[in-house]
Amino acid sequence: MMVEVGDIAPDFSAVADDGTVVRLRDFRGKKTVVLYFYPKDETRGCIKEACNFRDDFEGFKKLNVEVLGVSYDSVESHVKFKEHYNLPFTLLSDKDKNISKIYGASGFPFAKRMTFIINKEGKIVRIFPKVDPTTHSPEVLNAIEELK
């Protein structure tokens, strides 16, 4: 199943880097969500992408946006990655690859680099099927500002 712009974003639950269970539906009516899939913690492109989201985080916060990073890595791996680069947003473990499959971001052996913007109503309003990790965060921030 491939999701498209205009679809209601499929709900999911996943364990976050802090051990809590995050459910997409918990943000509905409250926040826009940036759901970004990336291949692997501690790899060059993923470090660059995560650090750019970190550096732009205040801009996302001002727009009431929740940033969720998703990869197949374990919670333990996410904890180390988050601490290593001082990442202020949530990383979700998709070890069973269910979230990646639902969103069409599953790949072998890693998740594909893709991003979805989900509005407060829970609708997918933008999909980035091809991502350049060096310029992606500002691109997402600009897209959200344009959508407001």
Image: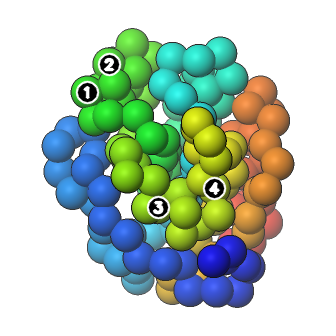
Q: Quadrant of residue 93?
A: top left
| Contact (Cβ within 8 Å) of mark 4 with mark 2 | no
Q: Residues within 10 Å of mark 1 (few under 14, many from 20)?
A: some
User: Tags 1 and 2 in contact by the CB under 8 Å rule?
Assistant: yes
Q: Position of residue 127 (x, y in %)?
A: 74, 64
Q: Secondary structure at mark 4?
A: loop
Horizontal and vertical percent for residue 62? 52, 53
Marks 4 & 1, CB-CB < 8 Å contact: no
Q: Which residue is mark 2?
A: 80
Query: What is the count of numbered marks?
Result: 4
Question: In the shown orientation, is residue 76 left or right of residue 138?
Answer: left
Q: Amino acid at mark 3?
A: Ile
Foreground label between 4 and 2:
4
Give the residue at mark 3: 99
Counting other residues with Cα less than 10 Å from the Cα at mark 2, is it few (<14), some (14-19), or many (20 or more)? some
Could you tell whether 47 is left or right of 10 in the image?
Answer: right
Which mark identifies residue 76?
1
Q: Earlier in the sequence, mark 4 or mark 2?
A: 2
Question: Relative to 25, does residue 106 appear above or below in the rendering?
Answer: above
Pick the quarter of the image with the N terminus.
bottom right
**Residue at left 77%, top 57%?**
128
Determine whether the residue tagged by mark 2 lies in a helix, strand or loop: helix
